[in-house]
Image (cartoon, rainbow, N blue to C red):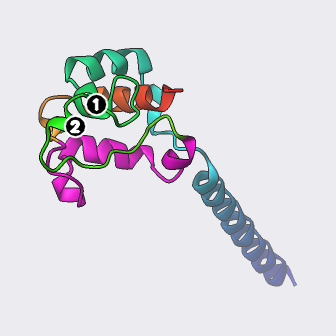
Amino acid sequence: MRRRKTKSRQTLGGKEALGWILALAASLALAPDITLAAGDATAGEKLYAKHACAQCHGPQGEGNGALLPMLKNAPSLRDWTDADAMADVTDEYMIEITEQGGKPLGKSEIMLKYGQKMTRDEIIDVVAYIRSLP
């Protein structure tokens, strides 16, 4: 009887632990992207200006930069101020494309590799700025 009770407690404990782990995993999956917890939108705005992102992406991130009409094969850029257009874009994707450039991700090769010009923290700041756009 004692062994059965001990075994039952161990089994129940295992189920409780599994339940807790599954609940935690579900909450993390449903939680907002926390990549930008340390992102500084003000610093990101300065980096956006410094690296001339507005030339293509526009001063307000609407995808209407002054350089685009001058390009022979201008890419179609997403309007970062459009909540519907941004709904499926993760922060991690934005960081990745900024670091690696467009070509490795099947996007325009015009998008440069800013991972060579900025640190990951600086890129996170730029993404925080983009997310702050109206």
- Measure the alpha-carbon separation of dots 2 and 1: 6 Å
Q: Which residues are magenta?
A: 83-111
Which residue is identified by label 2?
68
Give me the residue at 65% from left, 64% from top.
Answer: 22
Give me the residue at 63% from left, 54% from top.
Answer: 30
Horizontally, residue 41 falls left or right of residue 98, namely right
Give me the residue at 34% from left, 22% from top.
Answer: 59
Q: Give the vertical position of 24 relative to 133 (above or below).
A: below
Based on the displayed image, in which of its 4 quarters is residue 60 positioned? top left
Which residue is identified by label 1?
65
Q: Give the vertical position of 87 relative to 41 (above or below).
A: below
Q: Amino acid at mark 1?
A: Gly
Q: Is 101 inside the magenta-drawn segment?
A: yes
Q: Amino acid at mark 2?
A: Leu
Q: Residues within 10 Å of mark 1 (few under 14, many from 20)?
A: some
Q: Quadrant of the N terminus?
A: bottom right
Q: Residues within 10 Å of mark 2 (few under 14, many from 20)?
A: some
